Image: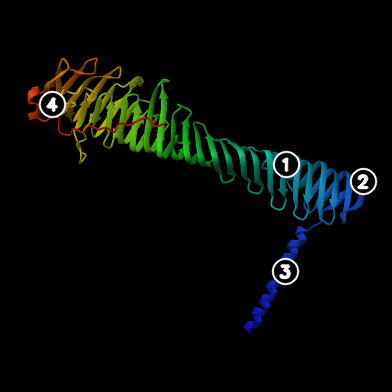
Amino acid sequence: MKNIFFKYFKQLLSLILFLSVISDLSFSQEKVELKFAKELSGKVIDGQEVREANGSVEFVQGNVKVYCNSATQFITANRIELRGNVKIYQDTLSLFTENANYFGNDKKAICEGGVTLKDPNATLRADNGVYLFSDSKALFKGNVIIINPDYKITADEITYFRNNEDSFAKGNVIITTDSAVITADNIDFFKRQGKTFAYGKVKIESDSTIIHSDTATNFTGEKLSVASGNVKIISQNNNAVITGKFLENFEKENFTIVKGNARFTQIENNKDTIRIYSDTMKAYRSKPEYYVAISNTEILRNNFLSKCGTGIYFRDSSKVSLSGNPVVWQDAIQMTGDSIYADFPGKKLQTIFVKKIERFPDSKLSFVISGISDSINQSGDTRYDQISGNDVTLYFKNEKINLIEVNRNSRSFYFLFDKGRPDGINKSEGDKIKIFFGEDDKVSRIKVDNKPKGEYIPENLLNTTPLTLPGFNLRNDKPVIKE
């Protein structure tokens, strides 16, 4: 009984499949009917029955209606050559062209001499194109443009799906929406999903930024862009430029994060340029505007050179904050500490503050090494003036060192010279030390407040005393400008 059931079930299934194939075949081969023509004649070409129709010609195939000035109908092939003022309608679709070939078996029109497609969602124009009526799919080429109340697309080629408004554009593509203008070699535009995928020489222009990259995804509703490959973002408000490998730009929040060899550049006063290099860069472009550089950070501005774990550049107040084993070089001075702050009012260096943060488990005294480029004595030893303490503040005048103040646990080593010849060392200790500099950037006077201690070691006894303070660490890894 069971075998008989399966036997009849297989026969029924085969019948259903056969009827389905017959139904599809009959649909695909639905004949195009000639409804009207002012003149009609028949002939045979290469064994095929052909009809020539002229004057207000009208054809119909199901819900597709075709109009033209004249036509050649190939009866057996179910194909029509349409000439002059061709108009094709399907429900809410209108297709206009000068000449076309209509293939009835495929329900396909190949249009030449300029083509326009209109539906309630959009209008398409191109030099030529193909439209598939069963798939609601347009393949247009040559100066293609799509116009919609919410967007416009221009490209060399576009494949457009009417049912969901998806567009796949190639060659010199430009998409304009309310939130951005996107250009690229190729773009996949999903209008109803609010997503745009761009490939090759991508450029995204929005209210405050311009993004360049190899590939990018734009989310219209969120005003979010994600880009990768040779990324560059330009702030249109201040001409700041950030480059890297990967980018996320949140246009609503005026926030950008760049990862992978991130580089920030901004020209100030047409000459002063600040450069920031790091693994990751976060840009906060709302007021107050600032930039956070994370991991392997380098900040360069004229003679101000620095390295640290994390650096923050406050653009509005022209301040720099460095943490994570920071080091700063300014001319012949090197500074190290738990944290370092630099102030550039009026775009000129005014103060650098080096601070010891005692709550840090590995906290170290702030340290300043001066005279890095000074003379070498006759024995070939290079001599460096040194300062250490909890808090060190360096004051600059016309971007030249003018004064150094050291607070708490203050110590200094100052090498003396007599007419250019080495003349021993002066050691000082106290609660507060002030070191004054002359116009030649050399120490002119030292003042020690609150229980001062001082010691002079003559030149002939230098081999009996340490020449460096505890924590001395001369660095030779100054950052350089990266093109």
Q: Position of residue 39 (x, y in %)?
A: 92, 46
Q: Determine contact: label 1, label 3, CB under 8 Å.
A: no
From the viewer's perspective, is 300 left or right of 152?
Answer: left
SS assignment at label 1: strand
Can the viewer see residue 454 in this picture?
A: no
User: Closest to the observer: 369 or 139?
Assistant: 369
Q: CA distance from mark 4 to mark 1?
A: 86 Å
For disc 2, the marked residue is 39
Q: Which amino acid is tagged 2? A: Glu
Q: Reading the chain from its start, which is encountered first: label 2 or label 1?
A: 2
Asked if labels 4 and 2 touch by Cβ distance under 8 angstroms, the answer is no
For label 4, the residue is 431
Other residues around mark 1 within 10 Å, as few (<14) / some (14–19) / many (≥20): many
Q: Position of residue 99 (x, y in %)?
A: 79, 42
Spatial CA distance of label 2 from label 4 is 113 Å
Amino acid on which the number 4 mark rests in the picture? Asp
Where's residue 270, x and y in %?
43, 20
Secondary structure under badge 3? helix
